Image (cartoon, rainbow, N blue to C red):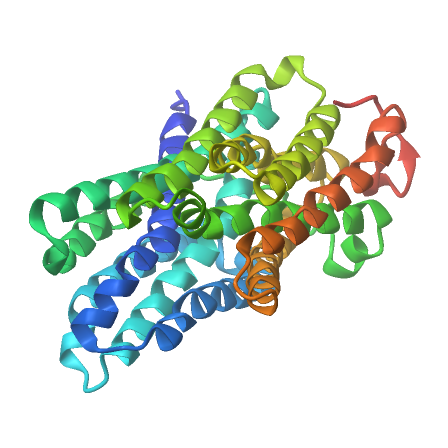
Amino acid sequence: MTKTKNYKKTLIACYLGFITQSISANFAPLLFLTFKDSFGISLETIALIPTVFYVTQLLVDLVAVKFADIIGYRTCVVTSQALSAGGLILMAVLPELLPDPFVGIIISVILYAIGSGLIEVLLSPIVEACPFENKSGVMSLLHSFYCWGAVGVISGSTLFFAIFGTAQWRFLTLIWAAVPLLNAFNFLFCPIERLVEDGEGMRVGQLLRFPVFLLMIALMICAGASEATMAQWASAFTESALGVSKIAGDLAGPCLFAVFMGLSRVFNGKKSEKLDLNKVMLCCGALCAACYLLAALSPLPIFGLIGCALCGLSVGIMWPGTISISSRRCPKGGTAMFAFLALAGDLGASFGPALVGGVTGATGGNLQTGLLFAALFPIIMVIGLIPLVVKKEKRLDLSGGGKEGKDIK
């Protein structure tokens, strides 16, 4: 008798995979001042770390479009965990071994950024290929674990430093490295299916010729920018607006933002079958724009904090929601579709915070003016979603060359 495959093991491995990605993205920024004090590296030089991280992820997204299917999901995803663990382990030891500590840090960042990029490209199609009901809900719940990972990294690291001091950061780095190291074994043995059979997936040229897929790319850029801009500037905004300490700023800013973002994804995961995803996304885009405007224009700091927190609530569904809409509109998109969506999201996540930083610098350090410009991203997203809401009864079947299909939510 054929043994029934346990896809819950696959889902758990993917949950831990997104927690791994959150560790990679959120841990190093907590050490920036520690790197400055320990190794004598200037803050201008340290600012290159997130740039290297996101540029590496973008390059991995591009490469994955071509090679992920050829190499195979299991090999790639196990490699993603090994590289993430290796990069974190090297960060704890390599700066001390090399003549230039910053070179050691950058080598470590590149390694775990490659792992993070592979995670971003692979986990969504791996879960999409599993025979789960309510795929939209499962996808939203899956992406919530990035948020819970961020909450765990920020709060756990803050608690560790409060007890043991920042001088012990290397031990904490090794502790976080244990997560992807153990999860590599989960991916070795859990069931993994192909999203589409060989030869059935759409080619890159076919995908890029469909206007609706290009709209999904635009929505994903806006989703990435809307999410990453507030996530990366929340701590600085909270400190400047409320005049609190660094620890309190991290907990009240990015940590609270991540909690609300995770809660929105969990709620959507539980209730998605009863919700119209297009309309939910439209409402979230409008709420996100309102939150940015509240943070930028409010004369009272407490309302700025409320805007920051509710922004997490509004952006939570944007990224997984765009993936779910794309999967429904383009069921034969294959790995290439998910890789392009990841690339678009990373592009927005890189461009959005940089725009806010540029505007803030040009206005004499006025962060609220920078956040005002960031409201453009959710506004553009709302404009792009309006046709999907108005014409949702006429589905463009991308795999069938423009036939009408069933009404979808």
Of residues 53 and 34, which is closer to you in this image?
Answer: 34
Q: Residue at x 14, y 76 (%)?
A: 96
Camera-nearest residue between 32 and 13: 32
The number of callouts visible is 0
> Residue most toward the front?
299
The image quadrant that residue 129 belongs to is top right
Is residue 209 rendered to the left or right of residue 229?
right
Judge whether residue 54 can be spotted in this image: yes
Q: In the rendered image, which quarter contains the N terminus? A: top left
Q: Nearer the viewer, residue 142 or 355?
A: 355
Residue at image point 60% right, 27% down: 136
Instruction: Give x and y (percent) for residue 205.
Output: 78, 61
Residue at coordinates 45% horizontally, 39% vertically from top-left?
Answer: 192
Quarter of the rendering containing residue 99 = bottom left
Return the x and y of residue 166 as percentages of the image width and height.
Answer: 15, 56
Q: Is residue 190 visible?
A: no
Name above or below for residue 272 compared with residue 344.
above
Q: Is residue 282 left or right of residue 86?
A: right
Indicate the position of residue 57 as horizontal and vertical percent values.
Answer: 49, 62
Residue lying farthest to the top in this orientation:
274
| On-image quarter of the C terminus | top right
Quadrant housing residue 204: bottom right
Seen from this angle, which residue lies furthest left? 164
Q: Percent position (x, y) of residue 83?
A: 33, 61
169 or 174, which is in the foreground? 169
Q: Is residue 33 above or below residue 19?
A: below
